Amino acid sequence: MTDTFARDHLPPADAWPDLLVLDGPSRVNAAVELLRHEGVAIAGGWSYEELGERASAVAAELRVEPGERVLLHSPNTAEAIAAWLGILLAGGIVVATMPLLRAGEIAKVIAKARPSVALAPRELAGEVVRAGELVGVAPAGGDVAAPLRVLALEDLPARGAFEPADTAADDVAIIAFTSGTTGAPKGCVHFHRDLLASCDTFAKRVLDPQPSDIFSGTPPLAFTFGLGGLVLFPLRFGASTAPVAKPGDMLHAIGERGITTLFTAPTAYRSMLAQEVPDCLRTCVSAGEPLPAAVAEAWYEKTGIRIVDGIGSTEMLHIFIGSPAAESRPGSCGRPVPGYEARIVDEDMRTLPPGAVGKLAVRGPTGCRYLDDPRQSAYVRDGWNLTGDAFSMDADGYFWFQARTDDMIISSGYNISGFEVEAALLEHPLVTECAVVATPDSERGHVVKAYVVVSEAVEAGVLQDHVKALIAPYKYPRRIEFVDALPRTPTGKVQRNVLRERSS
């Protein structure tokens, strides 16, 4: 029996983007394809055969029907990778969440995706249990909340046999969550063929991975940037992956584990410039926020490596604009990845000439399909995906980032909803009003700044700790300015543009 919840909550077909589908079989299980190789899968650890045995054991333990959603809440570990693969082998749908999220944030994902099982290491399982208690999981078509079955990754068997589910190429494989400016999570639905298409476009055509490569990076598996760099790309091409649970340990891990291919944000490259970088690196990929030309040049001078700068999105699954290192231009994201098309358009979807700044529109073998979300019509227009970025394109077809077209704050590669930070601040009894904007920062690109009106004096650090206790710590306002009142329009709306100008 198949659970059709995810399929039933896709947008209507006429709201999908045009898909430039790659050739491939009509039935395929992405996990089976990723586990086909021989040799070392987890650097310093499991072979492909051993990883497959662990994934099969997870699949057998889950006892889920094809199409059921399974929440995966874990840092980047070998066990998490085995669990991710096991969910797909069982025909389940992976719903991954970042390990820093608190119960209230996880609850939003549970409410939207309705997983029946959750996997997490013991140290994080309690947060998932609390999230389940906040929301529960409503069975399809039912009115009674069902308990969320939470399994500790450490308790899963290490070996097992399982006959992989016979999945279609266009069966749902993952629901990847991102947050919009309203703070409401958006579930981005991707099929089995989408996962493989990302490998066969960006990874194959831009990175040219070899079986001798060892991949690693700082983005969590819940970010599709991290999913590609740590799972999809290395395993698709018979290479190895070296998951690192704590981003702060990455530089040491590069030398210790012989990492050759690194995925991280510009902030990390900038911070490593002041340290000794091991010479085993061959390929460096940057995404998540704009890569300053100065950082790209300084990295090249220090290491001799040109950073592959890319633009991607959760909606598109991974990077769709990015050129091989030898063709890179500092400050530019490069040209469209083979298999994708991109153009700059105006408000009426008319193509703009080279040099003009407009909206970035893209299409290819992957694209946006939100799970039960009216915002689909804003992201997809006339068959093109509108990413919410303002770009220009030069005469040679290179794309240059200008700004975000929405109010999302991007700090150190993380997307942060100002609305969510404001909601957390307003839960403090002394906060009467607040507004959050991005403010430039030399280290992180941008940081969260809060303008706060209080009923009586309170230390900024008290409010910062308050926010950290409610939502993921990286979202807290690093800068707080106390004001007597917020600027408002005649209709009472906060004038965020005034605050942005003040903070720039």
Image: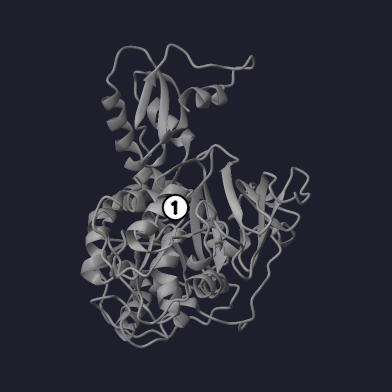
Q: Percent x, y for residue 114? A: 48, 56
The structure residue drawn at horizontal position 32% and vertical position 86%, both measured from the top left corner, is: 39
Which colouring convention does the figure follow? one colour
Report the number of discs. 1
Res 87 visible: no
Residue situated furthest front in the rendering: 301
Q: Percent x, y for residue 454? A: 37, 15
Q: Is residue 394 left or right of residue 33?
A: right
- In the image, residue 46 above or below residue 345: below
Label 1 sits on a secondary structure element that is helix
Q: Is residue 13 left or right of residue 61?
A: right
- Of residues 504 and 176, the one nearer the viewer is 504
Dot 1 surroundings within 10 Å: few (below 14), some, or many (20 or more)?
Answer: many
Res 134 visible: yes
Q: Percent x, y for residue 5? A: 56, 62
The structure residue drawn at horizontal position 44% and vertical position 52%, both measured from the top left corner, is: 110
Q: Quadrant of residue 43?
A: bottom left
Q: Percent x, y for residue 379? A: 65, 50
Query: What type is the residue that disc 1 sits on?
Result: Ile
The structure residue drawn at horizontal position 61% and vertical position 65%, both measured from the top left corner, is: 366
The structure residue drawn at horizontal position 57% and vertical position 48%, both measured from the top left corner, is: 401
**Residue on which the image places disc 1:** 110
